[in-house]
Image (cartoon, coloured by chain):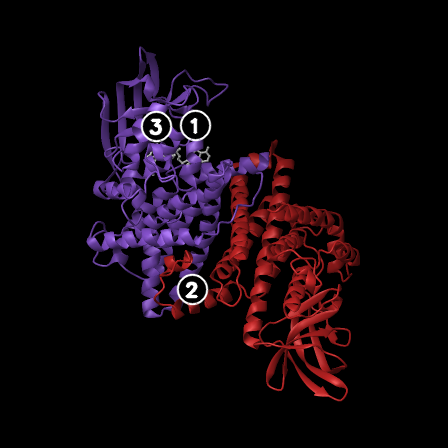
Amino acid sequence: MKSLVLPTVKFTEEQNEFRKEVRQFLKDEEAKGSFERTCDTWLNGYSEEFSKKIGAKGLIGMTWPKEYGGQERSMIERYIVTEEFLAAGAPVALHWIADRQSGPLFLRYGTEEQKQYFLPKIAKGECYFSIGLSEPNSGSDLASVSTRAEKTEGGWILNGSKTWTSGAHHSNYMITLCRTSPQDPNNRHAGLSQLVVDLSAPGVTIQPIQYLTGAPHFNEVFFESVFIPDDRVVGEIGNGWKQGMAELAFERSGPERILSTFPLLDEMIEIFKENKDENGLKEATKLLARMWSLRSMSIGVAKMLEEGEEVGIIAALVKNMGTEFEQSVPEIARLLISCQPRLDGESRFERFMAQSILHAPGFTLRGGTTEILNGIVAKGVVNS
Amino acid sequence: MSDMKEMIVDVTNNIFKDLSTKETIDKSENGEWTQSLWDVLKESELISIGVPENLGGSGGDFDDAFSIIYLAGKYAAPIPLSETIIAKRVLGELGQKAGNDPITFSFEEGNEVTVKKTNEGAVVSGKLANVPWARHAKNVVALAEMEGKSFVVQLPLEKAEIEKVNNIAGEPRDTVVFDEIAFEELALCEVDGDAFREKMLNLGALSRVVMMAGAMEMIMDLSVRYVSERKQFGRFLHRFQAVQQHLAKLTGETVISIAAMNNAIAAYEEGQFLQELAYARIRVNEAAEKVAKSAHQVHAGIGVTYEHSLHQFTRRLWAWREEFGNESIWIDKTVEHLLDNPDVGVWEAMTNTNN
Ligand SMILES: Cc1cc2nc3c(=O)[nH]c(=O)nc-3n(C[C@H](O)[C@H](O)[C@H](O)COP(=O)(O)OP(=O)(O)OC[C@H]3O[C@@H](n4cnc5c(N)ncnc54)[C@H](O)[C@@H]3O)c2cc1C
C-alpha cells in the first residue's frame, strides 16, 4: 500500500451550518410523519414521496455538474448529507444506489446522451437503479458470471439471470455485468461489459426473494432475450470489470458501512443518560470510540475520492471494520438493556433492536464478504 | 503534508533508522544512555520542534512536533523525545528557557513537590513516581505547592534521589525523591494547578497515542516482510487464507489508529474536554491488543525470541497503553462528560454541531 495515512478533514463553518440545515429538515419531516426512524434504511427504507422531496431539495446527485441536474457541491458536502440521513434513520433506499454509484458511473464512463437522459431524473429522485452483479452460481467469484449478451443489429440480446438484487422490484433500471465474449481462461476479467437494463423491458422477469424476516427485499431477475440498444452500453464493451471495480470504491467506504445500526446506539445512550446508568454509558463509550475512529477513516477516504486518488484497499478496510462495528451494536446493546426484540414493538428500543439483529447478518455480506475483502487487503499490502 | 514537514520527517526517519537500531535499544534496556542519538537530534534541532523560535525552539507547529514523536514511536527511540518536546513547548509558553539537555515531566495525580522559601533559597521536598527517563534527564517539570498556591517548576535532577524503575518495555520510569533539597535559584510560574495537570496529562496521553500508532506501523512492516519471505508447505505464508485474515486485521487496526491519531491531533485544543482525544485513546488502546496479537501469531516462534525485534515494539504497545490513563480512565472521563451534558445528543457531539 502506498501509504497508511489518510487525510484529515476539518469541516468548515459553512459546512457545519449546512449540516444543521439538513438535520433540521429531517427533524421537521420526522415530526410531520413523513417517515418513522428505522435502522438500516439505506437498503430497506423505501419511500417514493420522500425520495422526490429530497431530490427537489437538491440533495441527490449533489456533486454532479449543474447541466445534468447536479449542484456541483463537494464530496465532503455529500458525505455530510448521507451521514445525516442515516443518523436520522430516514428512508433513502430507493434512490441510494443511483445516487451513490450509477450516477457517478455515467459521469465517468457514460455517453453524453446517457448523462443527459439519466442524471437529471436521478437527481430529481424519480429514477432508481439496482446493482446487477451476483448470480445464482457467481457470488464472491464475480468474474465467473454467465449472464451473456450477444451482438445483434443495433444492440445486444441478453440472456441469463441475476440474484440478490436489492430493490429491483422498485427500480427502473439495473446496471448489469455480463459476458460479451466467451470466458478467456488466461484473463478471467476480460470480456465483461456493463449494460443498462430497463427493468420494464419485454423479457425481464422479476421474482421477489423474501428476506429472512419475510419482507420483500431482494429479487431474482431473469433475462429472456432482452434487447438492449447499443446506446445502453456503459463505457466500452469488454471493459466492464474495470468500470465495475471503480464503482466499488464508492460503494464500500461510505457512512452506510458504519451507521446502519446507529439509531439503536443513539436510543440506547439516551436511555442510559436518562437513567444515569454509568455502567451502560461505559460500554457505549467504547462503541462511540470505535465509531468516531471509523468515521475518521471513512471521511479520509471521501477526501481521497474527491482528489481522484486510488482507494481500493482502504475502502475495503472501511467496509470490513465498519460492518463489523454495525453488527456488534445490537449484540452489545442486548446485554445492557434487556428487552424482547419486536419488529412491531411498542418502544423504539424494541423495534431498533429487532431491526438490527435481523438485518445484521447481511452487513458483512452485501458489497463483498469480509473474507473476500480481507483477501484483497492482504494481497494489496504484500504487493506494495 | 507541507514541504517543510516532509523534509523534517525524511531527515528524522533516516536518523532513527541509523541510530535507533535493535542493538541500541537492547543496550538502552540494559541501562545504557543513547548519547549518540540524542546528540544528532540536538544538532539537527529536532528536540525542540514545535517550540516557537523566540522561545529558543526550532519553530514549526504542533503537527510537526507530533510527526517527530510518531517516528520516535515507530523506531522505539530510547530517549525522552516526546517528554522533552512537550516540556519545552509548555515551558516556552510560560516564558521559560529549557536548554538542550533531555527534560522530562511528571504530572500524575499525587505527584507534586512542596517548596519553601528560606535563606538558602528554595527548599524542595516531595516524591514523583513513574517519571519517564528521569535517570538520564537533566530536569523534571512538575507542579509545586508553595504557600497554598500552585506553580510549575523545572527542577534539576542532579541532587534528587533516583530509584531506578523500568516499564515492561525496559524504559526508565523512575521514582524521584527530593528530600529538603535547596536550590539557590528556582523559576516558579504560578498556574491553576488542576487545569495545568489536566493539560499535561492530555498532552502525555496524546503523545502515547501517537507513539503507539508509530509502533504499529513498524509492527505491520515487520509482519508484511516476514510473511512475504518465509515459506511453509512450499508456499509463502501470505498465500494462506488464514494468514491473510491476520494481515488484513493488522492493516486495518494500524490504518484506523493512524486516522484516529491524526484526527485527535487536528482537534487538539486546550482547555476543554477532549472528546476526540478520549476516543482516539480508547480506540488505539483497543488496536494495540489486536495488532500485537496478530503480529505475534504470524511471526510464531521467531517473534517471541529476544533475538527478533518484534518484541521491542509489542512490549512498548503494552507499556504505553497504560501510561497517562488507560482506556478505563478515559472511558470514565467520557461518561462524566456525557452525564454533565444530558441535552447534547451523541450525534451532535460527534459532529461538533450542537444547536
Ligand atoms: C442483504 C443483501 C443484499 C444484497 N444485494 C445485492 C445486490 O443488490 N446486487 C448484487 O449483485 N448482489 C447483492 N447481494 C449479494 C452479495 O454481494 C453476495 O451475497 C456476496 O457477494 C457473496 O456471494 P454468495 O452469497 O454467493 O456467497 P459465496 O460466494 O458462495 O460465499 C459463501 C461463503 O464462502 C466464503 N468464500 C467464498 N469464496 C471465498 C474465498 N475465495 N476465500 C475465502 N472465503 C470465501 C464467503 O466469504 C462466504 O463466507 C446482496 C446480499 C445481501 C446479503
Q: Which badge, 1 or 3, is on the more N-terminal residue?
A: 3
Q: Residues within 10 Å of mark 3 (few under 14, many from 20)?
A: many
Between tags 2 and 1, which lies in front? 1
**Mark 2 Cβ and ligand 1 under 8 Å apart:** no
Q: Residue at x 37, y 43 (%)?
A: A363
Cα distance between the residues tagged 2 and 1: 45 Å
Residue situated in front as seen by the camera: B299 or A236: A236
Q: Which badge, 2 or 3, is on the more N-terminal residue?
A: 3
Label annotation for residue A184: none
- Residue at the spot of label 3: A115
Residue situated in front as seen by the camera: B281 or B117: B117
Q: Quarter containing ligand 1?
A: top left
User: Measured from the top left, where is residue A132 in percent x and y?
Assistant: 33, 29
Q: In the rendered picture, chain A carries what hue?
A: purple
Subunit under mark 1: A
Residue at the top extreme, as displayed: A153
Name the amino acid type tagged 3. Lys
Cα distance between the residues tagged 1 and 3: 16 Å
Q: Residues within 10 Å of mark 1 (few under 14, many from 20)?
A: many
Residue at the bottom extreme, as displayed: B119
Subunit under mark 2: A
Which image quarter is the C terminus of chain A in?
A: top right
User: Measured from the top left, where is residue B71 in percent x and y?
Assistant: 65, 52
- Residue at the spot of label 2: A282
User: Measured from the top left, where is residue B292 in percent x and y?
Assistant: 58, 51
Label annotation for residue A243: 1
Q: In the rendered picture, chain B carries what hue?
A: red
Q: Is residue B259 above or below residue B205?
A: above
